[in-house]
Amino acid sequence: MSALDSSPKGLSSESARDRLEKYGPNLPAPSTVTGPLKMFLEKFRNPLILILIFASAVSIFARDWLESLIVLAIILGSTILSFASEYRASQAVKKLRQQVRIKALVLRDGEALSRPVEDIVPGDVVLVSAGSLIPADGVLLESSDLFVSQAILTGETFPAEKEPGESPEDATPAERPNCLFMGTSVRSGTGTFLVVKTGSGTTFGEIAGRLQEAFLETEFERGLRRFGALLLQVMVLIVFAIFFTNVVRQRPIIETMLFAVAIAVGLSPEMLPVILSVTLSRGAQNMAGHGVIVKRLNAIENLGSMDVLCSDKTGTLTEGVMKVEGALDAEGNPSGEVFRWAFLNSLFQSGLTNPLDEAVLAAPAAEGTSAEGYEKLDEIPYDFVRKRLSVLVASPDGGRFLVTKGALRNVLDACTSVNRGGTSAALDDATKRDILERFASWSTEGYRVIGVARKAVEDAGKRQDESDLEFLGFLRFSDPPSEGVSKELEELRSLGVRLKLITGDNRYVARHVAASVGIKAARILTGPELAVMRDEALWHLVGHVDIFAEVDPNQKERIIRALQRMGSVVGFLGDGINDAPALHAADVGISVDKAVDVAKEAADFVLMEHSLAMVRQGIQIGRRTFANTIKYIFITTSANFGNMISMAAGSLFLPFLPLLAKQVLLNNFMSDIPSVGIAGDRVDPEWEREPHRWNIRIIRDFMVIFGLVSTAFDLLTFYALIRLAGSAASAFRTGWFIESLLTELLVLFVVRTYRPFYRSRPGTFILASSALLGLLAVALPYLPAGRVFGFVPLPWPVLAAVLAITLLYLVVSESTKRAFFRFLRL
């Protein structure tokens, strides 16, 4: 402590500020937050943009000033448009994430304050309790029955007991019971520790720094990667074919290079990152307005694609407010003695606060129960293998008793005797059978039933003392189904999402709750059955079972992996320590604001209230977000692809380039402007009714079919222009520029909806910007600015022919769309 210039009262606020400047934020890996200048400059890292800038620079040296400056101006305009949209989106998301920052209890100026974990510095004194994430590496100063899960560092299944002391310098994390490590979590007990290392200097930080640990690739990210690979293949093929063919035809190298790269820019979805950022940030803001905070943006699309939601029953299907309905002896009679021992167990246990203990301490019977004269001596924390919690207490008369409560079967397994009317009797098979029958009967009625036992001991002991217990009786709890949950489940089903109940409770309670909210329970799979079941058998069975009972945390994760193996996009809703593995494994991890830190840290979304209604609203927003992203991809792969093919064909057979590089880039820039509005576009209700997933085959087929339609009309335009305007290059380029831009603007209205385009109203920005740009495209050749881009006024017959071809293209594209989606449904 002296080496860190700290004290048991912690640091002063001023000292903490100075150290934060010196050591930096307490982050396990270097921050990836991008400032505005860096974000702007990164826009120029696109290889295509760099090639265009290089070619323009060469053109300047060749004294073609005007052409080069126009190209550079368009590049700069596109970059500014992209940067402005993406930066606003990133700032909005940053503010939302502030709402779910993980905090720690730190002593500052002698007072316990809740501070973001990023602000913790060496020398801080931190207080931890059950459910806390350890925010840094440090040395224990005080502890009380402190057990910490270190699986993330050591791989150990069971939590390790921690207490102040000394460890050898060369000891591993598993061999340091006096130290706490960043990334681990408290399972039970309390402690106070001195922070020694923060950020990348911690054991966890060194691992994260080497591996740059990241989440697994989402379904959406995989789709984007495949789409990018498809476009890259097409783009490389077209660009090289155009470049080499035109070089062979002895056209100017610089002009050909600019034209070929401009085509590549036109084909590449350079606005896709912007559309994604804006769409996802708007989705995150909409979800925040409905009480859902997004921690990981790319998971929004996964939420929309989700077709299976796994959840515990407590707080989701039920009200989540436990009430003690009775303390009963082994024969089922009310017993104040059973309640007294259960009360002592709940009062003295130092593990994570849970609804059962809260219900015991809040029960009316607790008002007349006193712990005066009793003293806690030791504790055996709850774990998910034993499913019991024991507290060793000293009674006022000097006796020592180990008091145990937990899952009834697990408590009963540790008992050899039973209390009958104040006397102890052997626990024979007949008595055990009677106890289990009462348990099953009450559970079938929907009660949560746990067992209570005790034994007198001579010395303070640990786990080995949980044997030869005397069974005292039962605690019976009620947790009725939430009002309106049946309706919410029906709405989830109407959205194509199937709920699967995964609970540690017994099969009888699970069946009762499921039946009361409308979940069919033709088959229940239990934890013991899962333990002996091979993965292959689970894969084939998991889709046919909706209730999994008596499962442990590892089995929850196994169920989710099996569902994913069978092709489902799986969400998991959890809020406890035992839910962290499943939250990590799920495609969509959902937790709640009141959850333990380790659960919130593992989740992709945090609900401000524990409600299925919020999940449903999040799914709908996720589907709208996914829909608007797919719209842009369909638009890019339809008109753009067709136009690029047409340009390639025209450059091969025409005596001149069909468009100049600056005209290609202007076309691309103007057609991208309405695309920015896709993020806020309306989505047809039909899209929201079922989950959608990436299908690269559909995107490829869509690109080819609509690209060929676009190319066919471009070739028709070529023919009309040559017949009506002759072989003048300027008139040809002007006519085709108008037709090309108008078709790109109009196809947006066609492919943005499954419905006939005239029955689906687009967003205001899309409608207004497309109308203005369409008018500008027609008017540009007649304006002085048109000459700068090489345009000339068109005779009215030529302009009329171009507009007629454009309208015909709209009709044919609409018919093609209907046929395409009708074929998909077959």
Image (cartoon, rainbow, N blue to C red):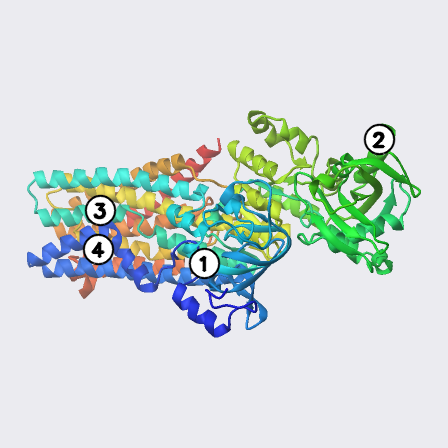
Q: Nearer the viewer, mark 2 or mark 3?
A: 2
As rendered, which of 209 and 255 lies closer to the eye? Answer: 209
Labelled pair 2, 3 in contact (Cβ < 8 Å): no
Three-letter amino acid code of the residue under disc 3: Ile
Relative to 10, say whether 72 is above or below: above
Mark 2 in CB contact with mark 1 (< 8 angstroms): no
Tally of marks: 4
Q: CA distance from mark 1 to mark 3?
A: 50 Å
Circle 3 packing at 10 Å, graded few (<14), some (14-19), many (20+), is many
Q: Which numbered disc, 2 or 1, marks the residue that appears first in the sequence?
A: 1
First-in-chain label (1 vs 4): 1
Q: Nearer the viewer, mark 1 or mark 4?
A: 1
Look at the numbered discs 1 and 4 and tell me whether their residues touch, using CB distance below 8 Å: no
Image height check: is 32 above or below 650? below
Q: Which residue is mark 3?
A: 263
> Foreground residue, 32 or 645?
32
Relative placement, left or right, of 327 versus 565 is right
Q: Single out the mark in the foreground, 4 or 2.
A: 2
Query: Which residue: 77% across, 56% down?
Result: 375
Question: On residue 796, which mark appears?
Answer: 4
Q: Label 2 belongs to which residue?
A: 433
Q: Circle 1 sits on which residue?
A: 198
**Pair 1/3: label in front:** 1
